[in-house]
Image: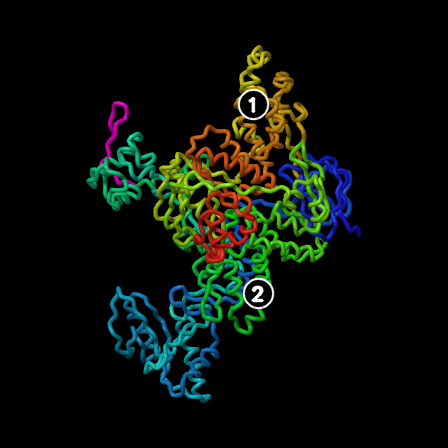
Amino acid sequence: MPAEIAVTGARTHNLRNISVKIPKNNFCVITGLSGSGKSSLAFDTLYAEGQRKYVESLSAYARQFLDLMDKPDVDSITGLSPAISIEQKAVSHNPRSTVGTITEIYDYLRLLYARAGIARCPEHRCELKAQTVKQMTDAIMSLPQDSKIMILAPVVRNRKGEYRQLLSDLSRQGYIRARIDGENCELSDPPELELHKKHTIEIIIDRLKVRSSAEIRQRIADALELSLKMAEGRARAVSMDDCFPALDFSDKYACPICNYTLPELEPRNFSFNNPNGACPECDGLGVKEVFIPESFILDKGKSLNDGAIKYWSPSSSYNFSFIRALSEKYRFSLDVPLQDLPLDVIHKIFYGSGTDEIKIAFSFGEGEYRKTTVFEGIIPNFTRKYKEAPDRQKEDFAKYLTALPCASCNGARLKKGYRHVFLRDVSGREFSLSELGNQTVRENLEFFKTLELSSQNQKIAQRLLKEISNRLNFLVNVGLDYLTLNRSSETLSGGESQRIRLASQIGSGLTGVMYVLDEPSIGLHERDNERLLNSLFHLRDLGNTVIVVEHDENTIKKADHIIDMGPMAGIHGGNVVAEGTLAEIVKNESSLTGQYLSGKLSIPIPSRRKNGKDYLVIRKASGNNLKNVTLKIPAGLFTCITGVSGSGKSTLINDTLFLAAEKELNGAVLAHPAPYESISGLNLFDKVISIDQSPIGRTPRSNPATYIDLFGPIRSIFADTKEARARGYQPGRFSFNVKGGRCEACQGAGLIKVEMNFLPDVYVECEECRGKRYNPETLDIEFKGKNINEILNMTAEEALDFFSAFPLLKRKLQTLCDVGLSYISLGQSATTFSGGEAQRIKLAKELSRPQTGSTLYILDEPTTGLHFHDVKMLLSVLFRLRDLGNTIVVIEHNMDVIKSADHIVDLGPEGGDRGGMIIAEGTPEEIVANCHKNGSYTGQFLKNYLK
């Protein structure tokens, strides 16, 4: 068996016919600048060939269910193992997908609750369990000797009625006494019962003293059997002198008090994806999408006459006639700010006048319409229209919907009965499945260490508990102990979802596999990085080859083998600059990575820190795990928000600050920020812009040229050429999205999709245009010897030189190069960009716009996918924005960025419920100086970067 993976002649994307050898069963890091060819080697060559060979070994029937990757452009790869790719991508957009379901922990929990759970009555909290007559008899016989007891048959429990016939029938059957509403009476002379009051009727079957004799035991058993028969499986033992609480029994899986029953517990009953267990009100989603008043209020400070409510302003004469009629009916002014109107008036506006009728009148044309009717309310009106709307129109209504916890299950997702099945720890605390799901991974790990089970249930649950604990430990080891099991996979970052899949792979225990990972350290604080590395080393030590595309300094230094790609990006990259051990990389003068690792190159510490005068302040933010945090952001400065994973950074900045600012500054009516008390200082800004890692477009037709508004001016340049003017071509002729100049065979895509029967769809080059997107007449038009297709195939760097005489294009292209994207082509499909590349394209777009100097920019981990050298370029861009007077707020773990900030806000001290507080704020030097006093992990690690 070969001891190494040998790649010969790899030419995928920008790879320059490279050959590398990777030692097997090693931890190998592939590093280099963005666009240097790292992913092309790791994913598009090594993983693609490994996966392709495995799929080709399957039957034709099996292959139709699997995606077959393209054969990479490589001469040969020897020594390949079965390949598993763990990339940074969203796990699922399915709202039913959670951390618990992805890791399969939830599946084991369902089985555990079904086999060892304690079912209780939702109303009386009594344990639901079927008892035999022997067990009931034993319970009574265990009472103190000579205890006087009555054995009762509860035939009526808390029900209205007179029950004359029932009492008469019982008397004829030979029963002498009964206890009615707690009072003993003779059945021959029962009390008169009120028809509309609830009553409890219990037949006295036997009265006796508890004694340890066979005769008494038999009497008790006979009395219980008769009671169970009469009272539909229920019986009671009551002290005649109140020496002990009443004992309730049932021979069914039912509450002995109210006879509430639950079918025998099965794992499917605890699945919110199964109708047997899902809450019928929300179908197991835990939330219901509803219309709320906040979605329609444009400005609470405006009056109704000034258009405070969207669609219900004077410009909508018919709708506003109802508002006018309400004001006449309930005598309120239409000129008073909405926020000053009485609450009952606001309720009537949004939820209707009930049974009260109002008189409406409105004019149309030359006529007038009058009628008397009830007002259904804005919310019921929109709800009705939404339900009646055809599918194509529902989207227009759906954007006003807000997800609120289901009123029936309160977000627990399960039916009522299964929400009341519990597991108990040694301290007596009981947790339902949904309550466990709302706990963090760390809290659940502690709970299962102290779980209390009967000896029988311990045997049943032994293997289940081992699987659950192992999976929880794996999540802890990859730094995800702060996640809750109910956390929706939609809300996970790329790094978090990747580490969840990594935890699942560690749990699988496979050996002889080639794992390929894409920057697993993303989103991790330096403190948690060590645990992640230990997990990767564990995978290697099992006998696997672990290949990681990574820029993290600590990860690179701990690699067994390093491959440095470069020397630069795009057409200037694609070569192996250096490979070998850390010592060999550091000695290599050609390696940018080696120079940064050795300290010959570095990101300088700013010579001075800017001071802030004015502040943006958000007070008492309490979303998710935030503990009434008050955040102060200095205006005009570069502020870094730091803290360990799960400490509350995203909740504070993305969910609270950004949405609150967006609502006030950008007029985003549908923005619903997390709870906070107040915000001040927004008057310092004219707008807020979030530059995140979401795609710049959802279709292959979107590209950088269209996104940063390059394509319009370029099309105009072509339309202004002599030949284009002679033919009467307008700028639209050079668009591949509309008819006219595009190739109609492929509709401007350049590719045609061919559906295969048992193989994945194949995209083939269009035979008409040969992938050029345009028809021959359009391609005849050239500018400086290039047609429109050749322009789209240019890199940003090439286009910058080509269009150097056009200031507008030059400025926009220069910004693309400034953010480290000189290697991307202008027409590259938006769907092919990583999250980090998409974020930098957005940043370039902002840089190319005219600056007001009063913008609040918010960025979430902009160093994703960036090499040390790229980070240096990014910082210069951020400083440029700051020096224009803008305010930059960055959530970041990269220490080179943190040390360069003017101001730091550090959250912690831990993740999850142990975080959510601001533990340090100030300059980087101040954070370091006080790190041991306030427990700042950021300060402790930052110390080494400020030397």
Q: Residue furthest top?
A: 726
| Residue for badge 1 | 735
Task: Name the element at disc 2.
Answer: helix
Q: Amino acid at mark 2?
A: Leu
Residue drawn at the location 54% of the way across and 19% of the way down: 716
Locate residue 671: give its quadrant. Answer: top left
Magenta span: 359-376
Locate residue 822: give its quadrant. Answer: top right
x, y percentage for residue 22? 74, 47
| Magenta run includes residue 540 | no
Q: Residue furthest right?
A: 1
- As drawn, 454 above or below 777: below
Q: Identify the mark at residue 465; answer none if there is no mark.
A: 2
x, y percentage for residue 764? 67, 31
x, y percentage for residue 624? 43, 52
Q: Are marks 2 and 1 in contact (CB under 8 Å)?
A: no
- As drawn, 762 above or below 736: below
Q: Identify the mark at residue 712; answer none if there is no mark.
A: none
Instruction: Compare residues 240 and 187 and report the one nearer the observer.
Output: 240
In this rendering, would 244 be left or right of 868? left
In this rendering, would 314 be left or right of 634? left
Residue drawn at the location 60% of the way across and 25% of the way down: 799
What is the count of numbered marks?
2
| Magenta run includes residue 370 | yes
x, y percentage for residue 400? 40, 40
